[in-house]
Image (cartoon, helix red, strand yellow):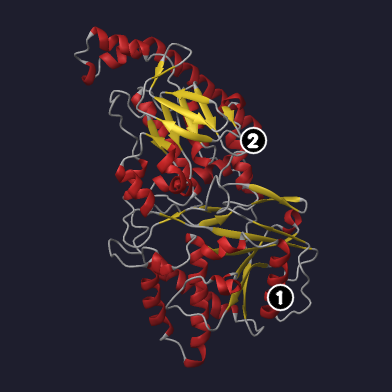
Amino acid sequence: MFVKASSRRLNLRVKIWITASLQLMTCAALHLSSSSSFSSSTPEDLLTVMKTSRQPRIVVVGAGVAGLGAATRLKELGFTDLTVVEASDTVGGRVAKSKIGKVWVDTGAQYIHGASVENPIYCLLNTSGLLSQVPPDEGSTVYYRRDGQRLSEDLADRVYEAGEGIFRQRGNNSGRSLGEHFAEAAQAFVEGWQAEEKKSVQGVLALVGKDYLINIAASDLHRVSVDSWQYYTNMGDDLNVEGCMFQMVEKLAEDVPKERLLLNKAVSKIEWDGSFSGTDSQVYPVRVLCGDGGEILADHVIVTVSLGCLKAQAASLFSPSLPAEKMEVIDKLSFGNIAKIFLEYEEAFWESDVSRISLIWDDDSVESVSTNKTQWLKHVSLFTVMKPQERFGNILIGWCPGDVADLIETMTEEELSSAITEHLRIFTGNLNIPPPKSVLQTRWRRNNFTRGSYTYIPVGVDGQVMDVLAQPLVGIKNPSKDLQVLFSGEATIKTQYSTVQGALLSGHRDAERLAQLYGRTAPPAVHCNNHT
């Protein structure tokens, strides 16, 4: 069923691609000269129009989800002179996979933030049949205190849900920090409980705050703006699709012709607003210089590298330099980090219906939810169970945020195995928990092609600055050469930042900007067919 559906979509896309290309060659002059902006065209204008009837040459820098989204959308829109350059040896960017034991796991994104037909990532997973691999029941959460006692799940679940409700009460131009908001509301909630319950309630609420640091990839709630989501579009509930996300990206990459995808091709410089003569006797406004000494001339370049890479390289990557207002936004936005620690066991020491193991410290406070590298184990308090067991075996994922994640990246597998084993023995009261037979930790901060996990908005910064980051560059020497350099990626879309769908939608956005420039019409949308 999937193969047949894919073939129909592929045939439709090929027809659209060929039709758009023929229409461009035969009708470009007529289309443009009949528009209001070309109503008084001179012979020179018409000559320019005829020259631009060739396929524009487009380079996409980065083959993460934003880059693949841009490339596949450009192909659907009939653009054929397209090259995607990727610095690493594989596609996907921050959607990635690695092997632990005998199974492949998602080392990058594994959650859909919005499991609905409004979410294009959900639709891609759904139409490809990958959602059928996701277990329908996530299971239960068990809560342990440091004295080895198990907290009542009924109590803990009620308090945890209330804590999540506090985070859903987000601000709008308040100027406050998320930590300030959470501390105030959480403390008021604690006061409503009996004295003997307050310590447990506060411990669970602090756990909610620590888990939220993982969601944000930050080190301190007091450094995160409570107004971060005032422009955010909620597409629905979260869904864990572990083991499926990297497969979705691989399927997405199949729509990019192999000869157009250049791996191990790092970009060292993007020269724009120039006049570079090509071997085809054409003059191009942009030249992309690569680390291997090669160069690619282009009419348009879509830059999809992470905010972390922009922070590290933007000052030297572009010539002329980026406008001051864009550099200011790159500096203002924060780029966080999370670490996943995969722990594979011969046998499970947890019950079969458990999906999460949460560790509660009685001395944690809701007043200041932040990480501390000197007590890093206090921030390895969430473990999720990979499901189904028949596919993944017995694997836990330990999660930690911010600077503790940075620290985890420097540790050996032996150090992590020893420390976490003792950690789990103390909290569960089970001194017979064996060390894991395999350990795998992620290293997103140390990866020079990502330099972290995803974007968050710090206190004092309005999410509208992402619009500035997304704004294409306007040339001075060649102002007639529109959209020379465009910027895609989750950090450029304030309504869906820090999400996989945000990355994809930003790539679509910039492909459609180019389509509008060349008078092209978007193809029919692929319906979100139900394969669950």
Residue 335 horizontal/vertical position (percent): 46, 54
Q: In the image, what residue type sits under mark 2? A: Phe
Compared across the picture, whether 41 is left or right of 206 comes to left
Q: Residue at x 76, y 65 (%)?
A: 436
Q: Residue at x 59, y 78 (%)?
A: 153
Q: Residue furthest left?
A: 40
Q: Residue furthest bottom?
A: 195
* Rendered image quadrant of residue 293: top right
Mark 1–mark 2 distance (CA, rounded to whole Å): 47 Å
Above or below residue 271? Residue 414 is below
Residue 379 horizontal/vertical position (percent): 56, 71
Q: Residue furthest right?
A: 346
* Camera-nearest residue between 401 and 20: 401
Compared across the picture, whether 369 is left or right of 260 comes to left
**Number of numbered discs visible in the structure rendering:** 2
As helix, strand or loop, the secondary structure at mark 1 comes to helix
Residue 422: image tag? 1
Above or below residue 41? Residue 519 is below
Q: In the image, what residue type sits under mark 1? A: Glu
* Rendered image quadrant of residue 323: top left
Tell me if residue 118 can be seen. no
* Rendered image quadrant of residue 10: top right
* Residue on which disc 2 sits: 2
